[in-house]
Amino acid sequence: MQIEQFDTGLKTKTNVKDIVLSPEQNFRNKNLIRSYLNQIVNLGLKEIDKSLDKAFINDVKVNCFHPLNEFVGIKNLNEKLWTPLLEAFPDLERREHILIGGAFRDKILVGSYSTLSGYFKKTWLGIIPNFKMINLRCCEIHELKEDKIVESHILIDVIDFLRQCGIFPINPSRGPEGAWLPPINTDGVNFFEKDIEISNSSLKQALSMNRSLNFKPETENISDEELKKRLIDHPQREYWHDKMIWYGPCGIGTSRSLEGFIDMHQLPFRKSFTERDYFKLGHYCEIGDGKFSLCAGWHSLEAYYGSNDWLGFTANNQKLKMRVMDFYHHDEGKIRENWVPIDILHILKQIGIDILEKVKS
């Protein structure tokens, strides 16, 4: 089957002048963002105003996980995200796993997957502390202009936070839960790739796999067994490594191999969202950096929740949007690993299930 080579980016911008970064400029941008993010955590509450002022423009646009959602300005960034987080976890530290940089159209972008670890001592998001160590999965994408962050997208896995607190208010995950592994056999943070073609090739492979998802055998009247067979023989097969690992958010879990990915996530997802358009809205981020690439949308997908196969909640054909990032590691000519933060809390809110209110009551 021939994969259509359509534009997967945002549809709202046209006639923009593409930015071209040298490998040296990209490496500098990554280290700059890294220093900003580490300083916020390392200096903590005492220097929070100084740290935020150094990193962000005053009217920074912030797109956050539910329940923080979208807001503007350093003051809101401090009051909604950082002060409550640093008060709840006073010994917070940041451990980086992946740092990816690049330019997409007229934007300079840096993406990060890290773990924020700390001793949970004060209520956060309405959840009382368990006085134990918590590891928060944190995925971020920041847009840089003149050495300041002008827009941020931040996804923290709140459902996984609840799980670590001993609360699991949703249906059991199909895949196993737990910490995501760092990239296999490579440094995902400090690498410097001088060959632009390697970076371009990584992104091209990720986008080709993304476009292949528009082949939808689930729209036909076939059994689950036949659907699974079709998905294993699907054009996506060309892009995934035999030992691929798909790291999903809490509520879905992690899976290994294409068959495991289909069983744990893709088949039930496709059955629940047969009426979907992956790229009606488009990506705000598409970058390649060495053996890594990163694609993300806010929102990535517009769809109708048509069955309870995925996540197991009653479906009333509700229309919803999804906040998703995809961090890819390319190895041995294939996509070897894929870390996928999804704002599950936000999805459930759109179908009438307020998890935080449920657990607080």
Image (cartoon, rainbow, N blue to C red):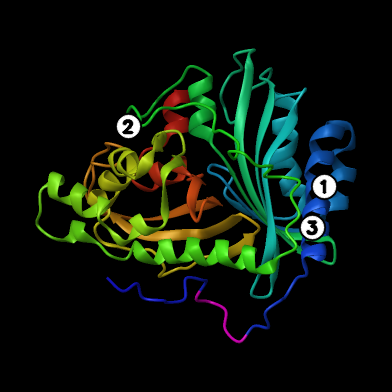
> Looking at the image, is mark 2 or mark 1 earlier in the sequence?
1
User: Badge 1: few (under 14), some or many (20 or more) residues near its Cα, within 10 Å?
Assistant: some
The outermost residue toward the front is 332
Identity, as a three-letter code, of the amino acid under mark 2:
Arg
Which of the 4 image quarters holds residue 311?
A: top left
Q: Position of residue 112 (x, y in %)?
A: 67, 47
Q: Secondary structure at mark 2?
A: loop
The C terminus is located in which quarter?
A: top left
Q: Secondary structure at mark 1?
A: helix
Number of the front mark, 2 or 1: 2
Identity, as a three-letter code, of the amino acid under mark 1:
Tyr
Q: Which residue in the structure is indicated by mark 3?
A: 27
Name which residue lies at 53% across and 77% down.
12
The region drawn magenta spans 11-15
Residue 226 lies within the magenta run: no
Q: Which residue in the structure is indicated by mark 1?
A: 36
What label sits on residue 174 in the rendered view? 2
Judge from the rendering whether residue 343 lies leftward or rightward of residue 316; answer left or right.
Answer: right
